[in-house]
Image (tube, grey):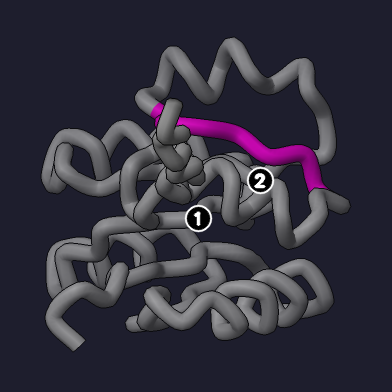
Amino acid sequence: MDNDILTLVAARPGRVRDGLQALLEAIPQIEMIDHVGDGASAIKSVVEHRPALVLLDTNLPGDEVWAVLRQIKAQWPQARCLIMSDSGQQRRAAKAAGADGMLLKGFLAAELVAVIKKLKLLPQEKPQTRMFGWRDH
């Protein structure tokens, strides 16, 4: 589809990546273009695919997530980058490196969808309007 959100997940193989992939695949507008397990592969995939959404796990090998994030934002600033972290204490480092958002691991599917909407990648729900009838007097 033309409106699909091209998405890259950079996380070590395992439960976090598998769970995240399952969550993302349940969102119809998301198109998983790649999932990688290290920073160098993440940068290569960003250059090749130009994703709209990049999810980065802070547990990438070699504590390289901040350098990878800075490089992604330098090469493809249009990408919205979400950090998945074990600790809220990394919020400042994520923001300094250029993250567009951060989720603490263990987040609910609804939280992920809300963050993607906040980044304006998914449509917002339209407010419901009520139709009021006119009374004849």
Residue at point 20%, 73% (across, down): 3
Residue 82, horizontal then vertical, whole percent: 50, 43
Relative to 87, is 92 above or below? above
> Is the residue 30 above or below the residue 89 in the image?
below
Q: Residue 12: x, y in percent?
A: 66, 69
From the top left corner, tell me how far across and down residue 97 is, in percent.
40, 23
Left or right of 113 on screen, residue 99: left
* Residues at discs 2 and 1 in contact (Cβ within 8 Å): yes
In the image, is residue 103 part of the stretch drawn in magenta?
A: yes
Crowding at label 2, few (<14), some or many (≥20) Cα neighbours within 10 Å? many
Q: Earlier in the sequence, mark 2 or mark 1?
A: 1
Q: The residue under label 2 is which amino acid type?
A: Met
**Label 2 vs label 1: CA separation?**
7 Å
Q: Which mark is residue 88?
A: none
Tell me how many marks there are: 2
Q: Residue at x 44, y 26 (%)?
A: 137
Magenta stretch: includes residue 10: no
Residue 7 higher or lower than 100, as above or below: below
> Residue at point 30% right, 68% down?
5
- With respect to residue 69, does 20 lie above or below? below
Q: Which residue is mark 2?
A: 84
Regarding residue 129, the answer to whether it shows in the image is: no
Q: Would you identify the image quadrant in which residue 74 lies? A: top left
Give x and y (percent) for residue 14: 78, 78
Q: Mark 1 — residue?
A: 55
Residue found at x 81% / y 55%: 108
Q: Quadrant of the N terminus?
A: bottom left
Magenta stretch in the rendered image: 99-105
Q: Amino acid at mark 1?
A: Leu
Element class at badge 2: strand
Category of crowding for the residue at label 1, using alpha-carbon neighbours closer than 10 angstroms: few (below 14), some (14–19), many (at least 20) = many
